[in-house]
Amino acid sequence: MITKPNVKINLGLNVLRKREDGFHDLETLFVPYFGISDTLEIVVGDDYSRTSAELFAKYDPSAVAPRQGSVKPEGVFGVETQDSDAPKLVQGISEDGKLMITIARAEGVDWDPLKDLTAKAYFILAEDFNLPPVKIFLEKTSPVGAGLGGGSSDAAFALKMLNELCGLELTEEALAGYAARLGSDCAFFIYNRPMIGEGRGEVLTEPKGLFDQLRLDWGQAAAIGAGDIACEADGKGSVGDICDGQMYEIQVITPAGIAVSTKDAYGGIRPHLPVVPLRDALALPVEQWDGVLVNDFEETVFAKFPELAAIKRSLYDSGAVYASMSGSGSALFAIYSK
């Protein structure tokens, strides 16, 4: 089974308060964005894989099968590359031998594949079910540290795929419960449709009444350098909406060379109740969102990465009716009238 886990954007993100458990309560609207995605395949037992040979041919043409390179953590090895300190293709095998996971990424994979969220998705289900041996193949093309939830999406899609492949018959709500244990925004990708996120992001409700006029459409994705002003589309498939008969197009910008860690995003954050609650802000016409529908992480992240603030200003200069950072950054998005 092969899928394309998509990413998400956040329309508004209010950090309300810090909790006793160390997490923060927030409110946001998660919206799926289909212009950026990874490729995930899961095969059961000895079933044929259509992805493995392609990955090895693409990321290590000299290898017919993964060769043992520099030794990684237990059960993990990587294919060496000449142009990167991190291998572009790594593989891990669990101690019991039931899970083999292969991850490929052009920029290099600098993490233990057995600690990837897709592997954790298998392990968390294995605590409650006698899962068969599986092979996971993941090609990472979504940016890391961009606030788009690429890793969470991979994990949620893995849960859904394992549920189907292994005949677990878990409901969406049950899968969301497992996903919430893996990450704050992971549960959203189980539903993969616009959802209001509260709590630390795992408490999800349908935005009923707010978006009766909302329709998802295709648009463009853009990737630009941190210092660039002009944006050129390099992919297709984004989220658009129609409000009051007006068509809008969303473009997502992934600044090159900037990754924002959770620590950076929360450093200096000042939780507070918003002047305009999220639902009230979202109910306004899109043209009135600027300055009302806010992302609280922008203040902290823009202070550390002022080039992101410059990109946001350039989006408004290019005609956007609304622009914002997604999640904890570094990705931004802009809404344009069509």
Image (cartoon, rainbow, N blue to C red):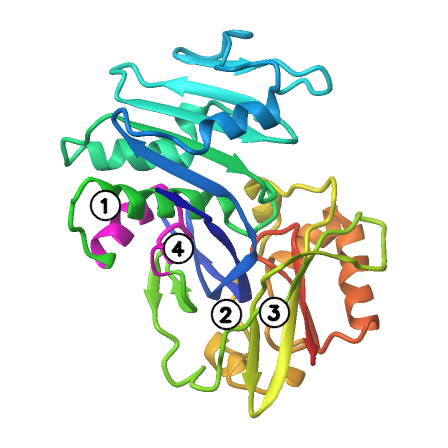
Q: Which mark's residue is nearer the viewer, 2 or 3? A: 3
Mark pair 2, 4: CA separation: 26 Å
Q: What is the number of the mark on residue 294?
A: 3
- For the residue carrying disc 3, how many other residues have a C-alpha within 10 Å: few (<14), some (14-19), or many (20+)? many
Type of residue at label 3? Val
- Residue at mark 4: 189
- How far apart marks 3 and 4 lie (CA) works out to 22 Å
Residue 182 part of the magenta-drawn span: yes
Check if residue 178 falls in the magenta segment: yes
Determine the image quadrant of residue 315. bottom right
Q: Which residue is mark 1?
A: 163
Give amino acid for label 1.
Asn
Most common secondary structure along the magenta stretch: helix
Going from N to C along the chain, the mark reached first, 2 or 3, is 2
Q: Amino acid at mark 2?
A: Leu
Q: Amino acid under label 4?
A: Phe
Left or right: 239 as drawn, with respect to 97? right
Per the image, label 1 sits on a secondary structure element best described as helix
